[in-house]
Image: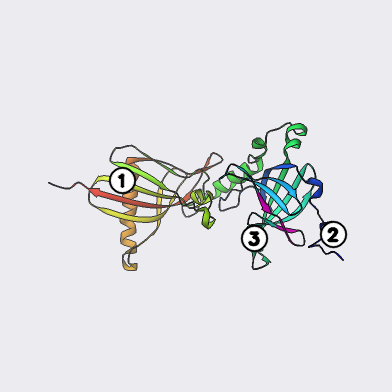
Amino acid sequence: MGTKTSDPTLRDFTFEPVKGIRYVEVKRRFKDGYSFNKEGFMQKPSWIIEVVKEDTMSAWSPQKHRMQNFYLQYDHGNVYNFAAEFFKVKHISKDSLVFQRIQVDGKVIASDVRSDVNMTFYAQDYIKNKLKAKAEDLQKPTKADTAFIEKRSAKVNLNSDSAFAATDPVQFIPKSKIARVEKISTVDRTNNRTEAYDYMFPQYIIRIDKAYKDFAYQVAAVVDFQGGIHVKTIYNVLPENVEAKKKVAQGIADIYVRNIFNVAPGTTLGVPHNSEITLTMIGKANKKP
């Protein structure tokens, strides 16, 4: 006698009816229906998939610029695994698919935010001929997302201790040739560090020539919605020196950085708001002959 593992027809869903249909992910939402969480992380719909057969899923590879086949493994319940991800199937039809993306740790489904994501796919034919739309328009954040970000921004902007990540991070625009800035990318696909890390945890190195003396400070700071810099934590100093060094670093931020850079605050959906950054400030004094 067959089992759910060996006989797909015994499962709640079988992929046979949708074989050969190419689907585009049009929305990815948290359980509350928003594309964003309160930390500022944005769910971006990006997958393109096609069922090749009951045990093979093809997915678009941005790195290889082609569809790539993955083993589609039935796990248990309505849970499947492909492309190193676990998904719970919630809906299947020729027009659309809904998967819940889940985090599995040691065969246990994590009950935290990592399993709180629903992915909706529409068939390419459905998008083009029934909706008469473009996938990229369907993928855009909604009015509800904008209202959520406006409300969240209004709240954090009341207090420089509050912040959330900006999908368009802070910009330092030099006003002088003695100053330059480098934004550090920490994307590392081998360790699952996606592009999201670069806006969730933005890092900058500012270098200033002709400073009053040599200095180097690394700090965590909140850049407020008006571009003000508020040093919160200073790194790599002895505990007894923290307060004194923090004051010096704040002074450098106020006097040097604010005067020789235009500091544009981080924004999300065009709304400026407080966001936190890691900032390394390096000054080089003019060497006397």
Q: Is residue 75 magenta?
A: yes
Mark sitting on residue 256? 1
* Kind of residue at disc 2: Leu
What secondary structure is marked by label 2? Answer: helix
| Residue receiving disc 2 | 10
Query: Which stretch appears magenta?
Result: 69-80
Between disc 2 and disc 1, the foreground one is 2
* Real-space CA distance between mark 2 and mark 1, rounded to the nearest whole angstrom: 68 Å
Name the image quarter holding the N terminus.
bottom right
Residue at left offset 59%, top offset 45%: 149
Crowd around label 1: few <14 · some 14–19 · many ≥20 (10 Å): some
Left or right position of 157 against 235: right
| Residue receiving disc 3 | 103
Q: Is residue 112 magenta?
A: no
What secondary structure is marked by label 3? Answer: loop
* Real-space CA distance between mark 3 and mark 1, rounded to the nearest whole angstrom: 45 Å
* Percent of width and height locating residue 49: 69, 46
* Percent of width and height locating residue 141: 63, 41
* Real-space CA distance between mark 3 and mark 2, rounded to the nearest whole angstrom: 25 Å
105 vs 194: above or below = below
Q: Earlier in the sequence, mark 2 or mark 1?
A: 2
Q: Earlier in the sequence, mark 3 or mark 1?
A: 3
Residue 95 placement: quadrant: top right
Residue at left offset 81%, top offset 62%: 4
The answer to which of 180 and 186 lies nearer the viewer is 186
Q: Is residue 33 visible?
A: no
User: Marks 1 and 2: in contact by CB < 8 Å?
Assistant: no
Crowd around label 3: few <14 · some 14–19 · many ≥20 (10 Å): many
* Kind of residue at disc 1: Tyr
Q: Is residue 151 visible?
A: yes
